[in-house]
Image (cartoon, rainbow, N blue to C red):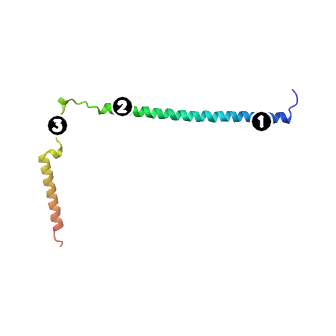
Amino acid sequence: MGAVTNNDILNAIVSLTSEVASIKATGEATKAQAEKTNGRVNSIEDWKNGLMAVEQYKKEQQPTIKAGTVIYQQKWFQNEKLVGAVVAVLLAVAGAVGYVVGMPKG
């Protein structure tokens, strides 16, 4: 081997710089592609999870009661006695409030 000249050192530096730039560009392209792919995979997983949730909801909402087993439950406001009692209490409260408000201040 002969003596190493300044030109040899400069050529080696230029070559290494070029290699480093190539490796850096490949790394950035690989990273960008990985992020893009991960984004797509995440979107697909989100859609899959959403569809599974919809299917589960549909299964849970399907009627499982047969016509022979239905028991009618009367709503409270359809019960005449209960509504009459509620109205009587409200009228009594309103009368008491009216009496107190109408009392002369003394």
Q: How many marks?
A: 3
- Labels 1 and 3: the sequence-earlier one: 1
Is residue 31 rendered to the left or right of residue 48?
right
- Residue under the point 41% across and 34% down: 50
User: Where is residue 65, by image quadrant?
Assistant: top left
Question: As displayed, is residue 81 above or below residue 39?
Answer: below
Under mark 1, the amino acid is Val
- What is the spatial separation of the Cα atoms under label 2 and label 3, in whole angstroms? 30 Å
Image quarter hosting the N terminus: top right
* Location of mark 3 (residue): 72
Residue 106 position, x and y percent, is: 17, 73
Q: Residues within 10 Å of mark 3 (few under 14, many from 20)?
A: few
* Location of mark 2 (residue): 55
Q: Residues within 10 Å of mark 2 (few under 14, many from 20)?
A: few
Element type at mark 1: helix
Which mark is drawn over residue 94?
none
Under mark 3, the amino acid is Tyr
Marks 2 and 3 in Cβ contact (< 8 Å): no
- What is the spatial separation of the Cα atoms under label 2 and label 1, in whole angstroms? 61 Å
Marks 1 and 3 in Cβ contact (< 8 Å): no
Residue 11 position, x and y percent, is: 80, 34
- What is the spatial separation of the Cα atoms under label 1 and label 3, in whole angstroms? 89 Å
Element type at mark 3: loop
Residue 80 position, x and y percent, is: 12, 47
Which mark is drawn over residue 14?
1
Is residue 65 rendered to the left or right of residue 79?
right
Identify which residue, 105 or 74, lies in the foreground.
Answer: 74
- Residue under the point 71% across and 34% down: 20
- Residue under the point 31% across and 32% down: 60
- Residue under the point 14% across and 58% down: 92
Under mark 2, the amino acid is Glu
Marks 2 and 1 in Cβ contact (< 8 Å): no
